[in-house]
Image: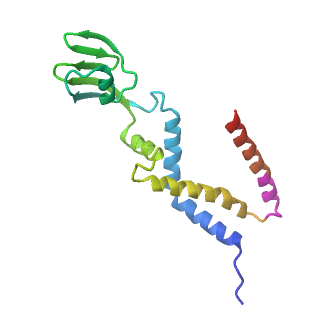
Amino acid sequence: MKSKKSTNFYMRIVHRYLGFFLIGVMSMYAVSGIVLIFRDTGAFKVEKQREKKLQANLNVLDLSRELKMRNLKINKTENAILYFDNGTYNSITGIAKYTSKELPFVLDKITHLHKSNTKGSLYWLNIFFGLSLLFFSISSFWMFLPKTKTFKKGMYFTLGGIVLTLVLIFI
């Protein structure tokens, strides 16, 4: 006679193999999450010299928009050349020469993937990954039988994690 497999059995199997399958994605999100914490600093960024042909006679607002520089301020103007903190703009020729700080290629790609939204083509990956993390959180309760010492100790850690989450939300 065949014995019916328990929910614990199936949860453990799905938890195990989904974990193995997602190890690369979880590692990528971990690294990109750390990088994103430092996005307002120069950490991990490298300087790149840029030269861009723009429309001539742009005003400061349009120049800021074209160069994707927030709060662009012109320090001085000499002979139709506008000087700003990271470079220059020749208002006659439309040539902008400036220095930008950017993440290296791979870090830039993974942070953009991490920040994706429904306008991007891979937002479904974030949804799948989020649901997988939710599954990992819930399925961990089926890893040990409720009567065991490990499960009971795990409940204390769960309570501690919930309290920490609430503190982080409300401080």
Quadrant (top left/top right/bottom left/bottom right) for the C terminus = top right
* Magenta highlight: main SS: helix
Kindly indicate the quadrant of the structure image that contains residue 146.
bottom right
Q: Residue at x 54, y 61 (%)?
A: 20
Q: Percent x, y for residue 168?
A: 68, 37
Q: Is residue 89 magenta?
A: no
Query: Which residue is at the front of the view, 149 or 171?
Result: 171
Q: Quadrant of residue 74?
A: top left
Image color mode? rainbow
**In the image, is 114 to the left or to the right of 164?**
left
**Can residue 33 be seen from the camera position used here?**
yes
Q: Position of residue 134 (x, y in %)?
A: 62, 56
Q: Position of residue 138 (x, y in %)?
A: 67, 59
- Decide whether residue 151 is among the magenta residues: yes
Give the magenta range. 146-155
Which residue is located at x 23 percent, y 28 percent? 51
Q: Would residue 23 be seen by someone viewing this image from the given angle? A: no
- On screen, residue 163 versus residue 94, left or right, reads right
Residue toward you, 30 or 125: 125
